[in-house]
Image (cartoon, rainbow, N blue to C red):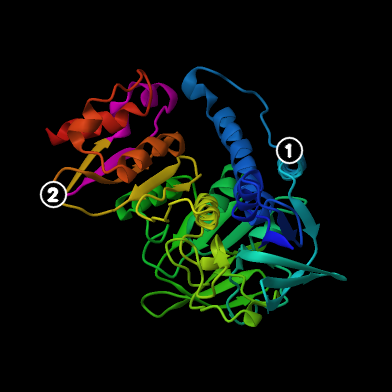
Amino acid sequence: MYKLAIIGGGPAGYVAAEKAAKAGLSVVLFEKEELGGVCLNEGCIPTKTLLYSAKIYDYSKHGDRYGVNFEGASLDFPAVMKRKDKVVKKLVGGIKVRMRNAAVEVVKGDAVINGPVSDGFSISCGDSAYEAEKLLICTGSSAVVPPIPGVAGNPAVVTNREILRLAEAPSRLVIIGGGVIGMEFASFFNSIGTDVTVVEMLPKILGPMDPDISAMLQAQYAKKGVEFHLSCKVTAVEGSTVVYETPSGDVERAEGDLVLMSVGRRPNLRGFGLENLGVTVERGIVVDSHMQTSVPGVYAAGDVTALSMLAHTASRQAEVAVNHMLGIEDSMSYDAIPGIVYTNPEVAGVGAIEGARVLQLPMAYSGRFVAENERGEGICKVVLDTSDHVIGVHMLGNPCSEIITAATIAVSRHCTVPELLRVVFPHPTVSEILKETLAGAE
């Protein structure tokens, strides 16, 4: 009998497996596809690889702004996709090595929970049966495909999974959903020359992210040629044409060669015997601050909990779960979970959007930003509570995906403005914009 069985080898599963095994627990990890989960194989890594190629292509097209002229610059779509596959393969291989070095037994196949046994839980995979004292469920999530007429069985409609396997770029792309995934694909395809239309049901893009920054990003992409239709309800898909209703009740059509369905994700709760455990399920598997479910000895982490569908959240939840199994004091907090949109320019935010005071400053106050972002626009917003603790930071502008870590530390440690102003920031860096913005509080 194993000490721990983990179902799902994504950012929650493989992190938990390595940590538990290194602490001396015997671990079996079940994964039906490839280690790394959606993040590594169909999400975070492949999309960021594509977006980096698109960013380089963007720079080549506008090199004259920096005094550098590129003649005949072009993007080789098959080569870009091939490089994406190479990056994914390399990183998947790296996880396999980590599991082997940690002495984690990795079983490839569809694991099914049979239910509790006298001193643990029984799991089947293929023709083999396994037992473990504790169980960690990390089955992740899948793209939501709503029952819109004309979507089911339509080869012109793809999700984030299928669009990463295209042999050639579409001339026209209609994206249903203007959230993070939708905007990242809008950014990529717009950069490489595809005509992009975004149809979003909400009155803004990027869902719960800072509304001012969402509006600024939308305006910048509108200038680049992306067409937005907000507060619009999709009523049907006819081939590769999206039919939608405007706020005034008019019926309009957005024509494309391909339609990307990007309206969110839902936890994977079926197909692995979850019903044989009797855990409490609402939107996802219900867990406490230690990632325990309602059944003793059963934990859950990652997208399957529906609490914060981000890879870094999943990994942290996994650490908390394993620490609790080991008797180490730890608990999960969601007050300082950073979110990033890897468009060009990037968007990053952490913590509260509203507070007692909001300080903001254009990114142009950073000398490094001006030097590296010709004609670039950006903003840094810092949210404070009544005692001048930093409770949120939200930014637009490259490379805020790297700066947000410092902001996350500030929010998670409840730092005050005076404390952060005493920190020495390296010069010249774009990260100095945090200190410049905070200086406005004095």
Up/down of 386 relative to 28, above or below: above
Instruction: Residue 109: name its quadrant.
Output: bottom right
Q: Which residue is mark 1?
A: 76
Looking at the image, how many numbered discs can be counted on the residues? 2
Q: Amino acid at mark 1?
A: Asp
Residue 369 lies in the magenta-colored region: yes
Residue 376 lies in the magenta-colored region: yes
**Whether residue 265 can be seen here:** no
Residue occupying the point 18% across, 32% down: 418
Element class at badge 2: loop
Residue occupying the point 37% across, 47% down: 349
Which is in the foreground here, disc 1 or disc 2?
A: 2
Stretch in magenta: 362-385
Instruction: Residue 240: name its quadrant.
Output: bottom right
- Circles 1 and 2, Cβ within 8 Å, touching? The answer is no
Q: Which residue is mark 2?
A: 386
- The x and y percentages for residue 112 are 74, 73
Up/down of 426 relative to 281, above or below: above
The foreground one among 392 and 47 is 392
Q: Amino acid at mark 2?
A: Thr
Q: Is residue 33 left or right of residue 306?
A: right
Q: Is residue 95 left or right of residue 61?
A: right
- The x and y percentages for residue 429 are 38, 23
Please report whichever mark, 1 or 2, sits nearer to the chain's N-terminal start. 1
Give residue 330's mark: none
The foreground one among 228 and 56 is 56
Image quarter in which the N terminus is found? bottom right
